[in-house]
Amino acid sequence: MALRGVVPAHLSLDCATMKKYSIFSLARNAGNYHKDWERAWRSPDPKKEYDVVIVGAGGHGLATAYYLASKHNVTNVAVIEKGWLGGGNTGRNTTIIRSNYLQDPSMAMYELSRSLYEDLSQELNYNIMFSPRGLLMLCQTEHELRAMKRTSHANRLAGIEAEMIDRARVKELVPIINDSEDCRYPILGAYYQPRGGTARHDAVAWGYARGSDARGVDIIQQCEVTSITREGSRVTGLDTTKGHIKAKKIAVVTAGNTSLVMQMAGVSMPIESVCLQALVSEPIKPVIDVVVMANTVHGYMSQSDKGELVIGGGADSYNNYSQRGSFPALEHTVTALVETFPIISRLRMLRLWGGIVDMTGDRSPIISKTDVDGLYVNCGWGTGGFKAIPGSGYVFADLIARDQPGDIAGAFGLDRFKQGRTIDESVAAAVAH
Amino acid sequence: MLVITCPVCGIEGEEADFHCGGEAHITRPATENPEGITDEAQRDYIYMRKNPKGVHFERWRCDRGCGKWFHACRHTVSMEILGYYGITQKPPAALLKRADPLWQAHFEAQAKKAKSK
Amino acid sequence: MSNKPYRVPTAGTGGTVGRLIDRSQTVDFTWNGQKHSGYAGDTLASALFANGIRVVGRSFKYHRPRGVIGLGSNEPNALVGVGTGARLEPNIRATQVELFPGLAATAQNAWPSVEFDIGQINSLASRLFPAGFYYKTFMWPQAFWKSVYEPIIRRAAGLGVAPDGPDPDTYEQFNCHCDVLVVGGGVAGLAAAEAASAGGARVIIADENPQFGGISDIAGGTLDGEAQSKWVAEAAQRLAQAGHVHVMSRTTVIGHFHHNYVMMLERVADHDPRIMNDGAPRHRLWKVRAKRVIIASGAIERPIPFANNDRPGVMLSTAVRAHLVRYGVAPGYRGVIFTNNDDAYRTATELLSAGVPVARIIDVRPEPDGPLVEAARTAGIEISAGSAICGLLAKSGGKHITSVKVAPYSTTGRVSGAEEQVDCDFVAVSGGWNPVVHLHCHNGGKLDFNDEIQSFVSRKHDDPVVTIGSANGSFDLAALMDEAYAAGEAAAGASAAKAKAPKAASEPEGALEPLWYAPATGKYNEGNKHFIDFQNDVTAADLELAQREGYESVEHTKRYTTLGMATDQGKTSNIIGLGVLSGSTGKPIPEIGTTTFRPPYTPFSFGSIAGTQVGKLFHVVRRTAQFDWHKEAGATWEPIGDWRRAYCYPKGEEDKHAAINREILTVRGKVGILDASTLGKIEIKGPDAGALLDRIYTNTFSTLKPGRGRYGLMMNEMGFLFDDGVTVCLGKDHYLMHTTSGGAERVVQWLEEWLQTEWTDMKVFVTAVTEQWSQFAVAGPKARTLLEKLEGDVDFSADGLAFMSMSEGTLEGTRARVFRISFSGELSYEIAVPANTGRVFWEKLLAAGEEFGVEPYGTEALHVLRAEKGFIAIGDETDGTVTPLDLGMNWAVSKKKADYLGKRALELPHLADENRKELVGLLTEDPNEVLPDGAYAVSSVTEKLPMDMIGQVTSTYWSPTLNRSIAMALIKKGRTKMGEKVTFPVAEGKVIRAEIVDPVFYDKEGERQNV
Amino acid sequence: MSEALIITALHDRQAPANLAISMTEIVDRGMIDLRGLPKDKKFLSAAKSALGVALPTEPCTSTQTGETLCFWMSVDQWLIVCPRKETGALLGKLNGALEGIFSLAVDMSDARSIIRLKGERVRETLMKGSSIDFTQPGFEPGTVRRMLFGEIAAMVHVVSEAPEVFDLMVFRSYAHHAWDWLEATATKGSEVGFLKPAEAPAVV
Ligand SMILES: Cc1cc2nc3c(=O)[nH]c(=O)nc-3n(C[C@H](O)[C@H](O)[C@H](O)COP(=O)(O)OP(=O)(O)OC[C@H]3O[C@@H](n4cnc5c(N)ncnc54)[C@H](O)[C@@H]3O)c2cc1C
Ligand SMILES: NC(=O)c1ccc[n+]([C@@H]2O[C@H](COP(=O)([O-])OP(=O)(O)OC[C@H]3O[C@@H](n4cnc5c(N)ncnc54)[C@H](O)[C@@H]3O)[C@@H](O)[C@H]2O)c1
Ligand SMILES: Cc1cc2nc3c(=O)[nH]c(=O)nc-3n(C[C@H](O)[C@H](O)[C@H](O)COP(=O)(O)O)c2cc1C
Ligand SMILES: [Zn+2]
């Protein structure tokens, strides 16, 4: 696989401060009724000053901290989180991981990320349950079929393994799918990425948190950044609900709250925050072993290892900071999925929630320096950044450490909006999860 | 689910009966003067958004009633709709007073610009 | 198997045993395939008790045997499958299933059976499986997660099985408005509804249970001097008959959303599926816009966890009492009560009076007293005050309780002193009450901790929502009724008429003593499981472990241990969990805070969300007036927007390819007709109509003379193409615009938006007329001859109707607009007639053309025809990132006009970049090779990936006209590369090479259309 | 030349027997879409002179003279419904009167299908497909209301109250969908009885 080369050779966990997890340590601890497990991360008070302060302990912020420490030996780092780590979109997404994007920069970014996911449990010594169970993007109109074929050509030439499959094979992979030829949107085929899949979202945040903490990173929870201080064109630190913290560099990784935090430094952003909802069914015995995305009808579904069907769809149309969405968007999604998987009609919705996603004008992310020295921003992942956590952290850490973007990050700079050099993925699929 | 009342025709409906057209009062540079528009001005027009957490001004269209556009003033956390005004109008002072500071700055800057002309 | 039945004889001393069942009517049902019977009025849970069945399920993680614990929708354990085959519904609470003849229910999550479940082995190894164990293991060897560990975990997890086929039943939705929506039909809800409706307000009152009254039948206290039930029955009747109050049972209010939008699920037919044969839907989803919402959702009793408190036979005190009073069943033959409050004494006396011995009341309070306690004492029930259950013994693999261990308890939270064993086979537990605050919280309502009841109650809501009754922590009947009437009156408005409230009285009750779990003696907790969340097998030790490991936030604890994430969403467990966390962290409960309450209140069917929108009603299909004709002619379809258009018309044995080729050759050689009715048509009129068009299109339209047409391109403000078409001038300041079929609506809105919001002083009206017209292309060398055969007054001659002009007249007795335009390059006309005459006119065209060999052609032939001519198609050559300049259409992009949409964007560095991809034609080296759709060209084929991609195919066809393949592509700097070869690695090991050529493949001079 | 034969969208549809309402397609109506500015007095009086009745300017109302009805569609848009045979003449008259006045009148007789619904359960049936509560006050004869019905654009005209008669108008290409939707939701046995006196519910 072409992009495999970008991935670091496998790292062994040589970090003395972290006790290793394994079946043996579990057995050992069982003897004492699990009373001796150490903390997965500390709960430190902020120091006066850090080399790098990362705002936002979501997956992207934590992964950035982890790679700063592990790849660039930058360890005087704090991650500041206003709530609990992993409680933002990282803790509320439908966990789809894929890399079969269309545009060159996206392919590079998401395939780097996906391949990092392959080894992440071992890298972090924390089982993040990466499950490359296979992902299908259904083709339900001729137009969609053609668009997917185009993507498949681009992916093949980029070294991303995926293939077009026909209806019969779709049915084989997803026995519960409606494969009728005369339904409203008959399945004409699908674009199948065998090593796309899911991971346990909380574990990704927790694994990176534990790994960063062990390398000396301070993760400071329940601490909200309220302003960013500057001297001339340079950042100097931040005011937080736990006092002022000095910082040589500040990296803002706050997803739906990006506009607000960047505004603290006087920087406007090409971002709108809207609510994206997801929901789960009651747990049932396995009925679907792959991830299915039906973009024409706006719905996607997979089944978690615990048994719930995990369902998501399109975002609301208006700005929203409340983590509560509107029913029509969701109704649209569920209706589509009942049509696509008729047996779910009798299953039941267990819980419904929303997250505030950061949408850019071209629906692609921003990984960038800014006009303010020492201020970096990583955002705009919108409805599809869970899959990008390892890759984004990897290239963002590199950008921060070297103060200049590498090949992959370069394409995602803020300057693209001024140049008209947008990266539009809606070309390939209406939904970009 | 938002419940919205169209200020043009008075019909009350649900958000599915309306269409949200995003942030209000975005100036299209070319309408004023098609010459000499900088790349920055073009970027600001197409991409830059206030995206406030608080009281916001936005555009809506009455899709299943009169088909007309109007302005709504809405809180982006509580979803409360504080008021409506015409699509060609500026926000009434009472609404502007409650709006996010970004909006107050916006109209102050506009007023300044108008004065200097 | 010798299951002892637990049905209590009719005549308890109180005479109230089995109020809801009709012992004269037996109802047969099956449980795990075996036949049983209960009585009309039973729930599945009570019928199972009556048949001596206490083990009804297995737990999620450890597969421990489980029985019924609670009542109605708060039951965490007794999840069963109801129905069979495609009608199987998994995970239904047995306590909510109303018995009906033929009901088939099955136990879940157990193999081979609930009685003997192999999975119980997990229970033995449970010490290896603390909370979060899977994060710590299953990592080696790396490949094993996907191939070994995950499949095992998946199979073991999950609860019930899904139905095995599409749902045969129907669902529907209902939208309505009301002045007041009352959630819950207990005494509080009924009282509030009475008060709210007294003045004529439109009121909806909904309760999830089959019966109104909440727990009023077992709560004690009187209304107007009589048992609460009497007033309940009268009030319910008054409301139902009022005519402006909608009274709904079996209806769960599932969610409260922004702007007081409330969703309710009405289970119309689950209790009696036979009514579906008469046309009833299975479920009806209600969408209610309520001016005000009154939440009277009651309170849920909480248990006090103790070691092995999950054994079948351990139940909530009110659940025991309700099962006894309502259905005449007891969970066993000898009970023990474990409580920290007075209410459980009611259960004790009720049991005794029904003839069920109560071995002991174990009360953690040192000195319980008051009338309820006295009554139990007088009845002769032994009370161990200041004591707690510190252990439980059971036999038969934990399925039968034999006794509990009791020890002195000091309110500091310790058990000490001599242990005593009390024989019993069931335990009724009460640890206090948690107000049901879910709906209050769905839309952001906040909570306050109430010390007296040791639970959370609603804080004033920002929305017009109030909470009353026991849902508000008002447990005293008189206070509750006052509150309910006041809330109803407030909702009705000050001027509304008032209802008369009954006089309420009830026995005084002592305070409760908070206790979050009763420790076991010895090294508490070790080996003994204190279950907090039954369904997800979360124990007190798990919660403490999460704290120890740093998952401190209650949200982390929830996710690490899965507390409250099961299908009951922690209804009986969340608050206790907080109590345990409070104990282990030393923080008070309010500081720990709750997790977020989210809709739905209880799980509800996906089918009800789809409602009517399934199958053929899933999504609309738009039909042209000729739809039936195409269908009868055997057309295959292409969906375009919501339309179905004829893709091609295979004849006899022909496959699609052959049909398309034939259709193309017919157009090129004879004459073909196409149903083009779906094309967008917009009339535009007003003094500024021309000026508007000049701003919308990249080229100029204001100079167009009446009767003339022009092809135009539309860009968005980013400079990207999004629609095209011919606009003709109908008269002074009056135009008819054609758009793509898929873009019709979007363009109308586009025009309206600019007119209304930006160019507000322009005087232009825009009216979409797409639906008014059927429109047909008549194309081919014989087009004119065919048309001239039609009866009418239209001049089709070369001079009478020049290329790119139009005329109006009458043809075959109908009004017609005739355009001389061509998308095929042939001599071609488009004729529009009113839609209701379309089908007949279409047939007239065919009849007139028969002698020339006319045939209908479909959208695919249309596409090949246009590609042969190098015409672009929106959606093929464009994808939202393509400018007119990329397509070499500079001729259509005005340099003169000062301002039009997208103009400025074309100057942005990236859009003006000379390295952009440009539209070219391609001829493959092998003329028989058709390039695949969307194939990418590379600068050179390399081993190393990614290869350098320089462009992609946008249209690719077999051209029967040229008898070879043709394609169009966007290639980097393509126009500078005419004659060069490009390489397409189209599959592993397969490369196609093609020459870059001009995209016009056929009739470059355009002579054919100009005859 | 004889006049062309007309085939309406729903010519082949007949309501099945299991419905609790009656449903028929109305085929003899012509329709004109009229645009103009209500603040333009000249426009209003020209329209009135051509139509024989003033245009309604109150939202959701209609005016009528003889068999000609004027439906309010928007603040600057009306739908004139008249006998189909008279449409051409009426349009000519309108265009004549509106000469030189900023306006647009278009024959839209074939653009919409009209489904006439009759019976006690009409309101309730409509409430299964649209967000509008037709049991609220204000939906009396003469009322017109645009809406989303079964996910498509539709308009309803309350023809009479006793008996209940409503005309549902949808664009022609959607007519079968609307009809199918009505067939699915108006079945006997699926009544809601919203806010009607009912039997007392069971109690504990
Ligand atoms: C419903 C839903 C479904 C999704 N499905 C998928 C999917 O299937 N696949 C996929 O790849 N992606 C998906 N996504 C997108 C994905 O979840 C996000 O792109 C990704 O998690 C973003 O991670 P993050 O670290 O940037 O942001 P977050 O995880 O949101 O982290 C940002 C953090 O910043 C903190 N913060 C904000 N303001 C401040 C402040 N002032 N001070 C301190 N801290 C602050 C927040 O509390 C938060 O913890 C989905 C998103 C949602 C909402
Ligand atoms: N002795 C005690 O300690 C104690 C404690 C609490 C209550 N009580 C007594 O219990 C009674 C309480 O009356 P009440 O009316 O407040 O409560 P209730 O429990 O009697 O009634 C509430 C009703 O609301 C229904 N409900 C809850 N959520 C719903 C939803 N989302 N959708 C539809 N229905 C829903 C419940 O099923 C129930 O029928 C009084 O008689 C009171 O005295 C006594
Ligand atoms: C993949 C995934 C699976 C989930 N499964 C469950 C579940 O089984 N039960 C549950 O109660 N919630 C489940 N949730 C939802 C969470 O409880 C929670 O709603 C979500 O993380 C958002 O947080 P919030 O509701 O606290 O705002 C799941 C969430 C995700 C992202
Ligand atoms: Zn309106």
Image: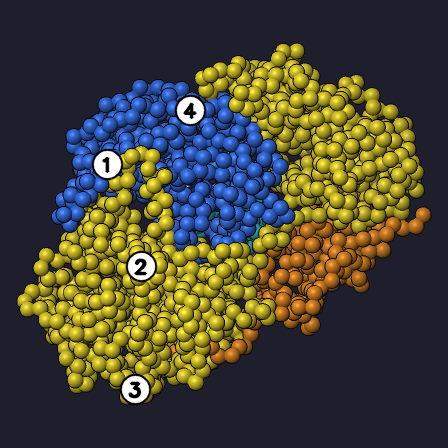
Left or right, C774 with reference to B26: right
Residue nearer the viewer, D109 or B62: D109
In three-dimensional space, the C-alpha distance between marks 1 and 2, rounded to whole angstroms, equals 38 Å
Q: Which corner quadrant of the image does residue C950 belong to?
A: top right
Tag 4: amino acid: Met
Q: Are marks 2 and 4 on the same chain?
A: no
Q: Are marks 1 and 4 on the same chain?
A: yes
Q: Are marks 1 and 2 in contact (CB under 8 Å)?
A: no
Left or right, C622 with reference to C984: right
Tag 3: amino acid: Gly
Q: Secondary structure at mark 2?
A: loop
Q: Which residue is mark 3?
A: C12
Instruction: State yes or no: Cβ of the residue under disc 1 lies below 8 Å from any atom of ligand 1.
Output: no
Q: Quadrant of ligand 1?
A: top left
Q: Which residue is mark 1?
A: A210
Where residue C195 sits: x, y (%)? Answer: 42, 75
Structure colour scheme: by chain
The chain coloured yellow carries which letter?
C
Q: Secondary structure at mark 1?
A: helix
Q: Which residue is mark 4?
A: A1
Q: Residue furthest left?
A: C417
Where residue A20 sits: x, y (%)? Answer: 20, 36
In the image, what residue occupies the spot 54% across and 77% down?
D197
Q: Are marks 2 and 3 on the same chain?
A: yes
Q: Answer whether residue C124 is visible to the viewer in this image.
A: yes
Point out the frontmost of discs 2 and 3: 2
The chain coloured blue carries which letter?
A
Residue nearer the viewer, C729 or A37: A37
Crowd rating for badge 3 (residues with CA inside 10 Å; few <14, some 14–19, many 20+): many
In three-dimensional space, the C-alpha distance between marks 2 and 4, rounded to whole angstroms, equals 46 Å
Q: Which residue is mark 2?
A: C117
